[in-house]
Amino acid sequence: MQVLFCHDGPLKVDVSGNYYGTAHNDKTFKRYYGIADKVAVLMRLNRIKKEESIKNLSQISLSPFKVYELPNTSNVKGIVAKRRKAKSIVKNAVIESDYVVARLPSMAGFMAINYAKKYNKPYLTEVVACPWDAYWNHSLKGKIVAPFMYLATKKLARGSNYVIYVTNQFLQRRYPTKGKSVNCSNVALTKFDDNILKKRLDKIKNTTKGHKIIIGTTAAVNVRYKGQQYVINALGDLKKQGYTNFEYQLVGTGDQSFLKSEAQKCDVINQIKFLGPMVHNEVFDWLETIDIYAQPSRQEGLPRALIEAMSRGLPAFGANTAGIPELLEREFVFSNNKNNIKQICSILLKFDEEKLLSQAKRNFEESMNYDSDIIDKRRNEFFKDFAGK
C-alpha cells in the first residue's frame, strides 16, 4: 500500500540521486508510514551543483521512499508551458497510490485532490498556511493571484472528508471543512527541561540596567513578508528617541540587500547583524544568547521558529498574523497596519525586568502544549481513522 504526499516543495537532489530537504525531512515523511507501508512524494526537485554545500540540508534516508518529480507550475510561465506535463505526472502518481495526502496551499496539492476525486482515491488535506496572506503580501502579481488561491483552498478544504490544520483556530475559521478535522502543529518538541527556564530567568535577573538588548528572528532574509524590515524601522524610530541599546540579529538564508538598505535608511546598520543560515542545533544554541524573539511575518501557519524560541523561555512579540496571536499574549502582538512601527516601539520599551520574567515563564509553559508525544498521538489516531475508512 502506498501513500502519496503532495506539495510544491521543493526537495533537492544530488548527482547520485540522494534527496535532501530543509522544510521537508525524515521526520516530516516518517509520520505517513502510519497510513501505508510505502511513502511516495510528488514534489518539485532542485538539482544540487557540485560546488554547493549540503551541510544545512537534511538527507532523506527513509525506505521505501519514492519521488515523482513535478515541473514548476507555481508561476505563470510554468502554468502555461508545463501544466499539461504536470497534470500527466500527477494523474499517474495518484493512480499508482492507495492514499493521497495533499498539503495546501500548493499547486501539487490542488491537482492531486482533483485526480483523487476522479479516481476515487481516499485523500486527506493538510492546511498549513493562508494563501491569501502569502500572495497578497508578496508582490503586485501576488495580489492578482491571491483571490484565486484563497477560493481554491477554501473550496477544497470545505469538500474534504479529512482535514488537518496546523493552527488551533485561525485556519479553521478561514478555511472551514464539512468533514472531520483535527489540529496538529508541524512543530513537535521533544525536550522540556526546567533548567532551561531557570537559566533564562537567571540571565534576565543578572542583566544590568541599560545593557544591550538582543532581539532575534530566524527566517529567510530575502522574503519581504517575513517582516524583518518592520523591526528595523522600529529601531530607527527608537534611535531618534534616544534608545540605542537594541541589537537585531537575523538568522536565515537569502539576499540581504533589501534589509541592509532599510537599516542604512534608518541609520541603524551598526545595530543589525546578519548571521546567515544555521543548522537546527545551532539555532537552539543561538536562542540561548538573545533576549527577545520577534516573529514579525505577514504570512504564517503556526510558526515553528516562534514555538521553539518560547521553549527556550524567551520573551517574544509578533504580528497579528495567522496562528501567532494563538501563541502570544495580546499585548505583545502588533497590528499589520500603518501603526505597526509605533506598536513595535511600544512593545520593546515595555520589556522591563518584570515583563521579561513573566513572559519567559508564560512562554515556556505555553510551548509545552507542543510536546511531540501529545501531537503525534493525536495525528496517528486521525490517520488510523482516515486509513480505516
Image (cartoon, rainbow, N blue to C red):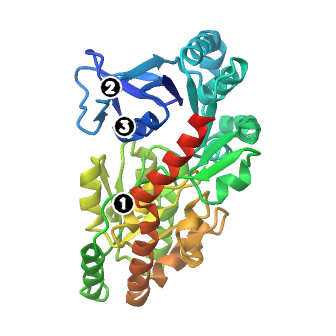
What secondary structure is marked by label 1? Answer: helix
Looking at the image, is mark 3 or mark 2 nearer the viewer? 2
| Residue at left offset 24%, top offset 60% | 285
- Give residue 369's mark: none
**Residue that mark 1 sits on:** 269
Q: Is residue 219 visible?
A: yes
Residue type at the position of mark 3:
Asn
Horizontal side, residue 157 vs residue 164: left or right: right
Q: What is the spatial separation of the Cα atoms under label 3 and label 2, in whole angstroms?
A: 13 Å
The correct choice, above or below, for 370 with respect to 143 in the image is below
Looking at the image, is mark 2 or mark 1 nearer the viewer? 2
Q: Residues within 10 Å of mark 1 (few under 14, many from 20)?
A: some
Residue type at the position of mark 1:
Ile
**Residue that mark 3 sits on:** 25
- Give residue 63's mark: 2
The correct choice, above or below, for 322 with respect to 197 in the image is above
